[in-house]
Image (spheres, rainbow, N blue to C red):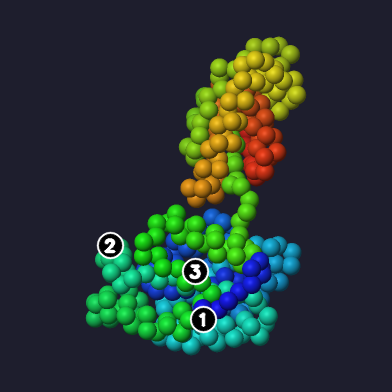
């Protein structure tokens, strides 16, 4: 297994390994972490693709990963080494992650999914697994990282990948993204919300003639909703809760969370609270997207 220096940022992450070892889960996790991912990329396209990614990276530093494996065909190993040589000639920095699992686990996974092993001709999954191990031995030797997923959950795989990405300097260090939605109950609850808060207990600006035609983005309405005893206590308790649970969401592997605040029409109280929460979360290092769904 090749050595690498810590924090040497790479242009390309190459995911390969045994069929059934979890490469599909791996690429999904990397996508959640902000990677641009391509599954089953033909090896003849790898060098050109990597060069394009490197050129784009001069303006946009989006990390990139590809999955290549035995689905390429009988010349996969030879073609991969040729492609790696071309990457090195073009000064493309890459790292290889090789996924594997023990024979019993691989047989069970293929039996449970009823998928055909790429090398299975006579129907024997175990024979195909042994053939693939022998074919990929030289690639395994060249890999920078080897991950045995035999006893892994998806969460375990995510944690292992995060540790690897931290080592190569491509880790996602930011907090999870928080999407905040302000809505009106009369138009329905957002179906994609992780947390829904009903704020109709707060003082309603709609019944104040000077505030009725404004919305929660205005300073007047915001102060009316948040600068009273109920509003202040609610925000204090809510923010304590969010700052407690959001790191736990990230620890569980969530890349984003959606929090929805609802009032009657979705124009005054919900908007004011959503905006107040947004400002606090940004101050605490979170990336926040806001949507005032029912605000015309």
Residue appearing at x 56%, y 68% in the figure: 65
Horizontally, residue 43 falls left or right of residue 230, namely left
Q: Quadrant of residue 93?
A: bottom right
Closer-to-camera residue (111/249): 249
Judged from the image, the secondary structure of the residue bearing numbered disc 3 is strand
Disc 2 target residue: 112
Q: Is residue 143 above or below residue 7?
A: below
Asked if residue 157 shows in the view, the reply is yes
Disc 3 target residue: 39
Neighbor class of circle 1 (other Cα within 10 Å; few <14, some 14-19, many 20+) is: some
Residue 292: give x, y in percent of width and height: 63, 33
Disc 1 target residue: 142
How far apart are the two marked residues, 2 and 1, measured between alpha carbons? 31 Å
Q: Is residue 184 above or below residue 176?
A: above
Q: Quadrant of residue 24?
A: bottom left
Which mark is first along the chain, 3 or 1? 3
Residue 276: give x, y in percent of width and height: 67, 30
Horizontally, residue 220 falls left or right of residue 51, namely right
Identify the image quadrant of the C terminus: top right
Which mark is first along the chain, 1 or 2? 2
Neighbor class of circle 2 (other Cα within 10 Å; few <14, some 14-19, many 20+) is: few
How far apart are the two marked residues, 1 and 3, measured between alpha carbons? 20 Å
């Amino acid at each position: 297994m090749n050595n690498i220096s810590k924090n040497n940022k790479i242009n390309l992450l190459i995911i390969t390994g045994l069929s059934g070892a979890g490469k599909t889960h791996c690429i999904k996790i990397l996508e959640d972490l902000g990677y641009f991912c391509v599954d089953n990329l033909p090896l003849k396209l790898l060098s050109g693709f990597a060069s394009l990614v490197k050129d784009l990276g001069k303006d946009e530093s989006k990390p990139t990963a590809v999955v290549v494996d035995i689905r390429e065909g009988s010349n996969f190993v030879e073609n991969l080494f040729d492609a790696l040589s071309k990457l090195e000639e073009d000064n493309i920095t890459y790292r290889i992650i090789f996924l594997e699992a023990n024979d019993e686990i691989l047989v069970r996974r293929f039996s449970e999914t009823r998928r055909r092993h790429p090398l299975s001709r006579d129907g024997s999954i175990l024979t195909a697994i042994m053939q693939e191990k022998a074919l990929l031995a030289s690639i395994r030797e060249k890999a920078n990282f080897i991950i045995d997923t035999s006893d892994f959950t998806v969460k375990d795989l995510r944690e292992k990948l995060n540790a690897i990405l931290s080592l190569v300097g491509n880790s996602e260090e930011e907090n999870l993204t928080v999407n905040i939605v302000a809505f009106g109950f009369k138009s329905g609850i957002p179906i994609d919300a992780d947390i829904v808060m009903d704020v109709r207990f707060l003082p309603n600006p709609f019944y104040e003639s000077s505030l009725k035609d404004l919305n929660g983005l205005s300073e007047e309405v915001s102060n009316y909703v948040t600068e009273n005893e109920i509003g202040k206590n609610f925000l204090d308790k809510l923010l304590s809760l969010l700052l407690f649970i959001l790191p736990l969401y990230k620890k569980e592997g969530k890349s984003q969370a959606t929090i929805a605040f609802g009032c009657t029409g979705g124009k005054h109280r919900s908007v004011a609270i959503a905006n107040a929460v947004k400002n606090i979360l940004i101050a605490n290092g979170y990336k926040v997207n806001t949507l005032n769904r029912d605000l015309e």
